[in-house]
Image (cartoon, coloured by chain):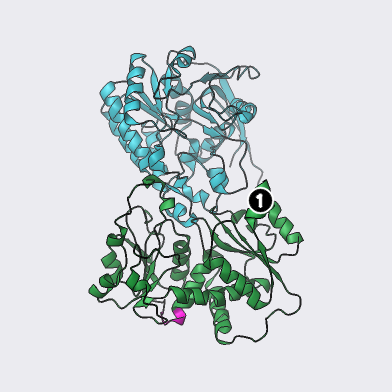
Amino acid sequence: MNFPSILESISDLNLGQVEYLLNSAKGFKYNPRKHPYYEVNQPVVATCFLEHSTRTRNSFVLAAEKLGAIYLNFDPATSSLKKGENLEETFLTLRSQGVDLCVIRTAVPGELHPFKNNPPFKIINGGDGMHQHPTQALLDLFTMIETGFKPKGNTMAIIGDCEHSRVCHSLIDLMTMVGCKIILCGPSGCLPRQTPHKNVELTSDVTYAINNSDLLYLLRIQKERHKKFGESNYFSDYPWSHGITMERLKKLEKNVPVYHPGPANIGIEIGACVFKNPTNKHELGYLGYEQVRHSLWMRMAIIMAMLERRI
Amino acid sequence: MTKKEIVKIETPTFVDMGFILNCLGDLELALTKLRNGGFENFTLLAGKESDGTLFKHPGHLCEKHPGLICSFSPMVNNKFENLDLLYSQELGDTLIFYQHSPTESLYIHSAYQIMLKAFDYNALFISFPHNLKLAAEGILHQGHISFKSGLPALSYISEEAVVARDLELCRSIGNKLHFHQISSKRSVELIKRAKQEGVSVTCGVSAGHLLYTDKLVDGFNNEYRYLPPLREEEDRQALIEGVKDQTIDVISSGFFTSKITTGPFIQAEFTALPPDKIFPFIYNNLVTKNILTLDQVNQLLATNPRKILNLPASHKKFVHEFSEV
């Protein structure tokens, strides 16, 4: 199976490739090897994070090291990027140093797009501005399936700042690909003007979203992206309007799991009682830590598939 | 592959009612492209000096380009700082008060004051319908493509609110109002209704907005980073209808840049169809397909802008030579 050299967005993958990655991640989860996969001819995997990250960077580092790759932490803050070197020159330098694959996070949407025609090495998009975060969506799908959710024919509600979330954009592409219906829910200014897909519904009514879904996926309000509201208190009513609390779920008698890509703002988009009720099954409770746990296996699968020219 | 025929079309010389230079370094190339595009006059609405500040003095922009007449209009801001400059740069019989908005929004009380002043001078007020606060740093039309690409979205309201506001001010004051470029269906409707009600308003559109939609930006294509942004097919159709029923009066250039970069879209310069491509593209895509007539195109590029700017009629002709599609 052939895969593209750059995983910029979910649209770079087809259903067969997604299924391959899910199976491969499952293999890493249930059949851990005692020895690393690469003991000779170790590939070099680098991370280049031009934006802050806790979960994504760490899980890629662990995934690379568990596979037995040589890991290079390219720190933009102490690199020649600070002296004015551009990204292309930096990548060519890294390639000359033997980097085979680089995980890149950037604040600029589409910044990796120009490299698609002539990639210096394999590239995984670790999040580019508001555009895409494909590996987060893949690990979310893996977590959902592993905890008992069947995407095909079921509905997930994504609640929060859908317009400005790269995770949301990747989830829409991936979940609709596997036959899941989506309800996007959020206050005005957080939803797209028109539906991005025939299986995606838009609503500002959080009760409707909860009542008509089998899984809740929460997003934080990205206040820094809402330039038109500036420093105002426009979203200060969010905990009451769209926050997911245990009281709200119990009142609606919804026994649904709650996902969040993190970092979560407790008391804003997610109530403390929901957050402190972790679960590892498709039931009422918080699955954020399961997402983090499953991220390792999915990212091992993605790195390995790319290094073996399957991606 | 069949050989493309060379088309030769003679038209009156054109007038560009709104040329914006991204930087002074582009000046020579821009003037060459204006000449090659058949333009005799152009109104330079804004441009930047090498230190990044807006042009204050036109200098001798066209001395190497005989036959090309540059009219320059300094920005009049809400403190009326450039009134003296403006008066000395008279364009035909019409002074122009211009709101330069890509970097500065004109608030309603300031717009009111400037339009009053325009009325006193019998001047034309050129409005750039774009509210920076409502635009909120958006760069791409708010629609499917902006959502998919994760680029900051520019809603209709940042244009339409200014169009509606300035039409109401103009109705109240009675001055002459021209919108530099409009891009939305609703803007066309608002201006059409105002014209029917006798408001003294004219408006322009870019050639790109008659030909393209935001779908071209899919894939972060820097060549189509326009302001106002390229919008949807129903907007493009409304603009064409606006041209046909004479709601829209002129085609103007807009932003000129020689630097269409391969870098990130968000950092690219605003651009537009260069002046030497305007007529060939309009002819090949709209005239040969019987969407517009050659006479309508001549009205948009030559007759109407001369009327709006009170320029004397010109008998000069220009022969355009280009390959047919």
The secondary structure making up most of the magenta span is: loop
**Quarter occupied by residue A66:** bottom right
Please state which of residues A95 and A81 is positioned toward the viewer in this rendering: A81
In the visual, does A95 lie left or right of B69?
right
Amino acid carrying label 1: it is: Leu
**Which color is chain B depicted in?**
cyan
Q: Which residues are magenta?
A: A145-151
Q: Residues within 10 Å of mark 1 (few under 14, many from 20)?
A: some
State which quarter of the image contains the C terminus of chain B. top right
Q: Which chain is green?
A: A
Residue A98 drawn at (x, y percent):
75, 64
Visible residue check, residue A280: yes
Determine the residue positioned at 60% across, 85% down.
A32
In the visual, does B201 lie left or right of B325?
left
Looking at the rendered structure, the secondary structure element under dot 1 is helix
Please state which of residues A85 and B12 is positioned toward the viewer in this rendering: A85
Determine the residue positioned at 49% across, 44% down.
B212
Query: Which residue is under mark 1?
Result: A81
Q: Chain of mark 1?
A: A
Magenta stretch: residue A148 in it? yes
The correct choice, above or below, for A174 with respect to B258 in the image is below
Residue A219 drawn at (x, y percent):
40, 63
Magenta stretch: residue B325 in it? no
Q: Residue furthest toward the left?
A: A251
Please state which of residues B91 and B305 is positioned toward the viewer in this rendering: B91
Visible residue check, residue B1: no
Residue A258 drawn at (x, y percent):
37, 73
Please state which of residues B320 and A131 is positioned toward the viewer in this rendering: A131
